Amino acid sequence: MQTNPIIRLTGVDIYQQDTLVLADVYLSVRPGEWIYLIGKVGSGKSSLIKVLHAELDIFNGEAYVAGYNLRRIKNKEIPLLRRKIGVVFQDFRLLTDRSVRDNLVFVLKATGWKQEKAITDRIREVMDLVGMAHSLNRMPHELSGGEQQRVVIARAILNDPEIILADEPTGNLDPETTADLMKIFIDLNRKGKTILMATHDYPVVEKYKAKTLLCADLKLSNPDKEQLSLDFSELLDEKK
């Protein structure tokens, strides 16, 4: 039985401010699929993720995410779309003036949760899942980078989204912490979550195999193995 794509872009140009970063993008992602986005800094990976999250507008082509038409989506519909999408940011974006628990409470109340017991139970559930239930009362600055990223993953899955967009989630982490976080993503994917992950982390892509798309020369493409290896060599040189 054929499954309709949960993400489908057809002939879309993607701009960051007034600069074209990806042209004529075609992307089709099935429910439960895992896809890596690779490419140099400035190649359009993060901009593509912002488009899918309705953070950047598009002006041509067709774009559908989780049943919403991004060309025609109304402002009042954007919060509904974002309940179906969890975003994991490299720079965390935790509110620094409140505890971990209050960060998560803020998200739930902003997305319509009202009952205190339901809020408490859901926060406990997601924090157990990422192994951080003991840190609810800590402040973000008291956590390591890996701990903060676990909280960010917990925040992303609070509303049980269909899609998880991860922008360089392991970019600043050591290999051991990266492995622990990847186990969380793998578990989420096994539970049916669709994952689109932008990454420079070549060892991660090599170890945890999945479809890989390359952002380069204003194009989004599915590279062959030789091209993929070459591009990752350039990315590794770029990071030194």
Image (cartoon, grey):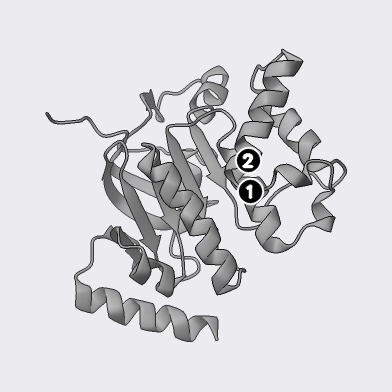
- Quadrant into which the N terminus falls: top left
- Describe residue 98's horizontal placement relative to residue 187 as left or right: right
- The amino acid at mark 2 is Asp
How would you rate the neighbour count of disc 2 (Cα within 10 Å): few for under 14, some for 14-19, many for 20 or more?
few
Q: Quadrant of residue 110?
A: top right
Please report contact status of discs 1 and 2: CB closer than 8 Å, yes or no. Answer: yes
How many angstroms separate mark 1 from mark 2 (CA)? 5 Å
Answer with left or right where residue 100 lies relative to residue 240: right
Farthest left residue in view: 1
Q: Toward the viewer: 14 or 96?
A: 96
Q: Which residue is mark 1?
A: 131
Q: Position of residue 170 (x, y in %)?
A: 55, 63
Q: Does residue 78 sit above or below 199 in this rendering?
A: above
> Who's the residue at 41% across and 73% down the image?
202
Identify the residue position indicated by label 2 in the image.
128
State the SS at label 2: helix
Kind of residue at disc 1: Gly
Q: Position of residue 223 (x, y in %)?
A: 23, 67
Question: Which residue sits at x=43%, y=46%?
Answer: 187
- Is residue 147 in sight in this rendering? yes
The quadrant holding residue 207 is: bottom left
